[in-house]
Amino acid sequence: MYKVVEGLVPALPTDNFVKLARPKRNIKAKHFKDHITSNIVEKRTCNNTKGLELPDYKKQQYQHSFFVDTVIHWNHLPNSVVHANSLEAFKTALRNQRQ
C-alpha cells in the first residue's frame, strides 16, 4: 500500500484506487479480550494524517479484497510509519511497530 499511496506503482494510478480521507473526529472502539466482533467503528478509525477513504464494500466478495483490507490496516498505522521517506524506511518502521 505504501507504494500505491506514494505513486511508485505505475500500473495503479493513485487517483483511481485510493482517496485521502477527510479529517474526522477520532472515535475508539471498545475491545474485550474474550469477544471477537466486526465493529464498524474499528474499520473507520484513522490514526494518521495520510488516512485513506475506505472503498464501498457492500458485496460479501469485495469485503476482504486487497484495497478494503489494506486501507483498514493502513489507517491504523501511526504517523511515524506512514510518513517514512523510502520503502526501506517504511519496512523498518513497520517492523519496529510490530514489536
Image (cartoon, rainbow, N blue to C red):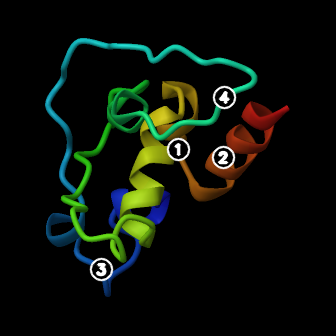
Q: Secondary structure at mark 2?
A: helix
Q: Residues within 10 Å of mark 2 (few under 14, many from 20)?
A: some
Residue occupied by mark 3: 12
Residue 33 location in percent, x, y?
Answer: 74, 21
Residue at screen point 69% across, 42% down:
94
Q: Where residue 47 sits: x, y (%)?
A: 43, 24
Q: Amino acid at mark 2?
A: Ala
Give the distance between the C-alpha atoms of the residues marked 4 and 3, in whole angstroms: 38 Å
Q: Which residue is mark 2?
A: 89
Real-space CA distance between mark 2 and mark 4, rounded to the nearest whole angstrom: 35 Å
Name the residue rendered at 46%, 65% in the picture: 3
Instruction: Name the front one of labels 1 and 3.
Output: 3
Q: Nearer the viewer, residue 23 or 56?
A: 56
Question: Element under label 4?
Answer: loop
Looking at the image, which residue is at 56% across and 27% down? 80
Is 58 placed left or right of 73 in the picture?
left
Disc 1 versus disc 3: distance between alpha carbons? 20 Å
Q: Nearer the viewer, mark 4 or mark 3?
A: 4
Q: Is residue 4 found left or right of 15 in the rendered image? A: right
Q: Position of residue 19 (x, y in %)?
A: 18, 52
Badge 4 crowding class, 10 Å Cα cut-off, few under 14, some 14 to 19, many 20 or more, is: few
Contact? badges 2 and 1 (CB < 8 Å): yes
Residue wearing tag 1: 85
Which mark sits nearer the N-terminus, 1 or 4?
Answer: 4
Q: CA distance from mark 3 to mark 2?
A: 22 Å
Look at the numbered discs 2 and 4 and tell me whether their residues touch, using CB distance below 8 Å. no
In primary-sequence order, the first of circles 2 and 4 is: 4
